[in-house]
């Protein structure tokens, strides 16, 4: 059953400039709040910011272009208390097939993260909410005849991982999440809660 991307509850559902204004009204206050809370917490922790970058793998391709997704993942965690932070998570995937079908897939997720230090290890868990975007190739796409070029879907992820400290401000990270997206099928059978395992591995820099 093929999937055409129709947003269900997407924060980007509004078209045109009003949609962008809606996004800014949501994101700007959140960024300011996180910045102020992080500034208040300056004296509580010497590592106030964690920046992650690395490889990302998703077990099922919700763009329906390939069997799975391989790409990059990046995140920034801002500590607002000793064990609690606010996480901004981004990932990108660019699947293609031998038949010329292609897509650019991105996720944008935000939410709280809880972490605990155990000597050289840091264990963390988080619950993230946001949006998933699929941009299809302008020609040769499986969905081009449906006039679907780009769509969004509400997305969320729950999971966690472990950091292994190599040096004072450098660590290795392994992370596993359950990633959920919600798109509607072409045959109008309703929205489908698409679940997939997301695995990330890379390095963490602490400031």
Image: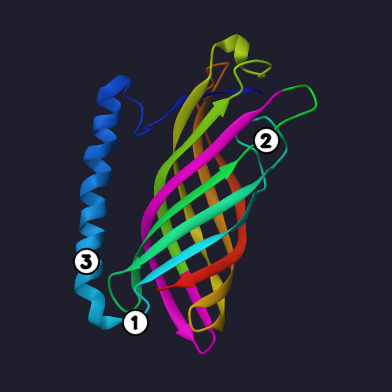
Disc 1 on helix, strand or loop? loop
Q: Nearer the viewer, mark 1 or mark 2?
A: 1
Q: Is residue 199 magenta?
A: no
In the displayed orientation, state which residue is furthest to the right. 98
Which numbered disc, 3 or 1, marks the residue that appears first in the sequence?
A: 3
Q: CA distance from mark 2 to mark 3?
A: 38 Å
Q: Nearer the viewer, residue 148 or 72?
A: 72
Residue 63 appears anywhere in the view: no
Circles 3 and 1: CB atoms closer than 8 Å? no
Q: CA distance from mark 3 to mark 1?
A: 15 Å
In the visual, does 175 lie left or right of 39? Answer: right
Q: Residue 97 placed where, x, y %? A: 76, 29
Classify the position of the N terminus by image quarter.
top right
**What's drawn in magenta, residue-wise?**
101-124
Q: Nearer the viewer, residue 34 or 68?
A: 34
- Residue 98 appears in which quarter of the rendering? top right
Disc number for residue 95: 2
Q: Residue 112 placed where, x, y %? A: 35, 61
| Residue that label 3 marks | 37
Circles 2 and 3: CB atoms closer than 8 Å? no
Q: Residue 43 placed where, x, y %? A: 24, 82
Q: Residues within 10 Å of mark 1 (few under 14, many from 20)?
A: few
Residue 138 appears anywhere in the view: yes
Disc 3 on helix, strand or loop? helix
| Residue that label 1 marks | 46
In the visual, does 144 lie left or right of 100? Answer: left
Which numbered disc, 1 or 2, marks the residue that appears first in the sequence?
A: 1
């Amino acid at each position: 059953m093929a999937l055409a991307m129709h947003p269900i509850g997407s924060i980007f559902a509004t078209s045109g400039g009003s949609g962008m204004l809606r996004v800014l009204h949501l994101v700007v206050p959140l960024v300011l709040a996180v910045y102020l809370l992080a500034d208040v917490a300056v004296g509580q922790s010497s590592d106030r910011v964690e920046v992650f970058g690395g490889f990302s793998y998703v077990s099922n391709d919700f763009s329906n272009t390939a069997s799975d997704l391989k790409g990059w993942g990046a995140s920034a965690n801002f500590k607002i208390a000793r064990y609690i932070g606010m996480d901004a998570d981004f990932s990108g995937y660019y699947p293609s097939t031998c038949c010329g079908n292609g897509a650019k897939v991105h996720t944008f997720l935000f939410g709280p993260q809880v972490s605990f230090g155990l000597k050289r290890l840091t264990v963390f868990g988080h619950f993230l909410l946001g949006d998933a975007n699929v941009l299809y190739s302008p020609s040769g796409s499986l969905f081009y005849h449906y006039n679907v070029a780009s769509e969004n879907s509400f997305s969320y992820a729950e999971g966690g991982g472990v950091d292994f400290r190599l040096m004072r401000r450098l660590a290795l990270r392994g992370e596993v999440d359950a990633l959920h997206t919600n798109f509607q099928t072409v045959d109008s059978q309703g929205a489908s809660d698409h679940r997939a395992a997301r695995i990330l591995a890379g390095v963490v820099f602490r400031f």
